[in-house]
Structures are given as C-alpha cells and as structure tokens.
Amino acid sequence: MIRLFGCVCGQFHGPGEGLGMTPGVRATVPVPFYVIEHPDGVALFDCGCPESMSRPGDSYLDVLRAQDLDVTLDPQDVTTRHLERLEIDPSKVRYVIASHLHFDHVGGLKDLPNATLVVQRREWDAGFDREVANHYGLRKRYFDFGHEVLQVDGEHDLFGDGSVKLVPSYGHTPGHQSARVKSDAGDHILVGDACYHEGVVESRQFPDFSDPGAMNRSLDALLALREPDTVMVFGHDPAQWADKPVLPSLRS
C-alpha cells in the first residue's frame, strides 16, 4: 500500500503579480507539502515553512516584510504537528525530496534530523554559489544542517518501483524538480513551483527572478506527462486547498 497525503503549512502573502495572479491586488496562497507512505519508508515532497515562523521575532519574516511579503503560520500547522496527526514520527522520515531550496519548501528540514535530502545536483550547487543563491533566494540557513544528501541528475526513481519518480522541471530555480506519485489515491504529478496554480498553465505569468524560457519548457513537459486520470497538484493553488482539498491531510 502506498498512501499520499497533502498538508498545508501556513499561508504566503504577497503582491498578486508575483504569484501569477491579479496585478495590484494582494494575494494569499497556501504552502503545501506532501507525505508519501511507502512500504520502504516515509518520504516527504517538500517540508513546509520553518517552525520559527509560527513564533514572534523570526528574523527572516522581517526580511520578507521589507519586500512586501509575509507568512502566517499557526503552531498547529507546522510540519511536525501534521506528521504527528498522521502518527508519523518525524525522526523516522526516510527522505525529504526538495522541489527546490526556497524557505517555504525546505523550512521544516531541521526538524527531520534523520532524513536524507533528495535534491537535483544543479540545485544543490546553486545553493552554495553566492551570486546564484542570492539571485534566487536560496538561504543556507534552511537547508545546510549536515543531513545526508542524495544529489540526482535528471529523472530518478526514488524507491525503484516506479511509484515515486522525480522529474526535472528547471526554471523557477536552477535545479527545480517535480514528482510523479502513483499511490492508492491515484496518479498525481506534484508540480511544485514549476507552476504556482492552474491559471498559470494558460497565462505563463512566472516570477521575475525565474528563467521564463526554462519554465515554459518544463511546464510543457509536465503537461505532456498527463494521462486521462492524472491529477496535477500545483505549487500554491488556493482552489486546490479550499473546501475540497485535492489530497487528504488525515487518515480516513
């Protein structure tokens, strides 16, 4: 049995144009991460915002607010609390697949001490190149904790049985990756920030810091993977986490 869950770890706030939404209107979007329960271990695809952002005085929140951005995170929605509600011990998570190294995708890593971080090699290299990291906002404070790191080049079959396949989707950051997960819930493509929400499939309104040519190619390639029953789960799509969430966050 392979089970897939989706958990929302806070909300991100910013100008609509930066999130592929209406220009001039402030937008609020969810910050999801995903839990894959496989017979060979638990893997997370991304791991949410840092727990410290649930408490006053977080220094990086000040940095974000100076850029007209913000995060709200209830203590009950931090990564470890979601795992505990799923009866998963955070110390026993085997893998954290990083779509990329932004704080809202690897922020929970420090609370998963025994996980192997699975990241595209070119993303890991970008995180340690000062100029590139500064351009893309890759902050070592959120991913450089001494975890074992599995650097992959391109496609990668995580468990060797085709259930979790990593798919390169470069452009949002130099080594962004997505994942195709075939579980008891069906066939899902976890798009990550290769596409913030369904509207971007048509608008192709990408962030200013990104490589738009690469993002277009990556999004086209992901869309081409779809089969009739495939569900695309986008990076920060409010509609997918509203009244009927695209994935469950709790066991039925």
Image (cartoon, rainbow, N blue to C red):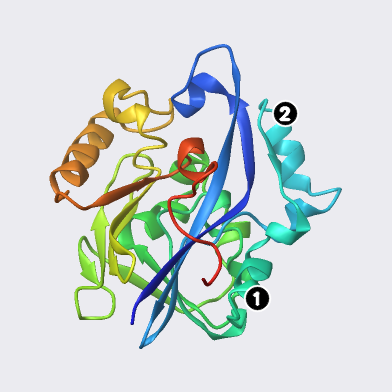
Toward the front, the furthest residue is 252
Q: Nearer the viewer, residue 65 or 34?
A: 34
- Neighbour class for label 2 at 10 Å: few (<14), some, many (≥20)? few
- Give percent across and percent down for residue 153: 23, 63
Q: Nearer the viewer, mark 1 or mark 2?
A: 1
Q: Quadrant of residue 177?
A: bottom left
Q: CA distance from mark 1 to mark 2?
A: 34 Å
Q: Nearer the viewer, residue 37 or 17?
A: 37
- Give percent across and percent down for residue 140: 57, 57
Q: Which residue is mark 2?
A: 66
Q: Amino acid at mark 2?
A: Ala
Q: Residue at x 59, y 71 (%)?
A: 145
Q: Residue at x 60, y 81 (%)?
A: 87
- Give percent across and percent down for residue 233: 37, 48
Q: Is residue 252 above or below residue 244?
A: below
- Give percent across and percent down for residue 236: 48, 41
Q: Which residue is mark 1?
A: 84
Q: Residue at x 29, y 30 (%)?
A: 201
Q: Is residue 95 visible?
A: yes
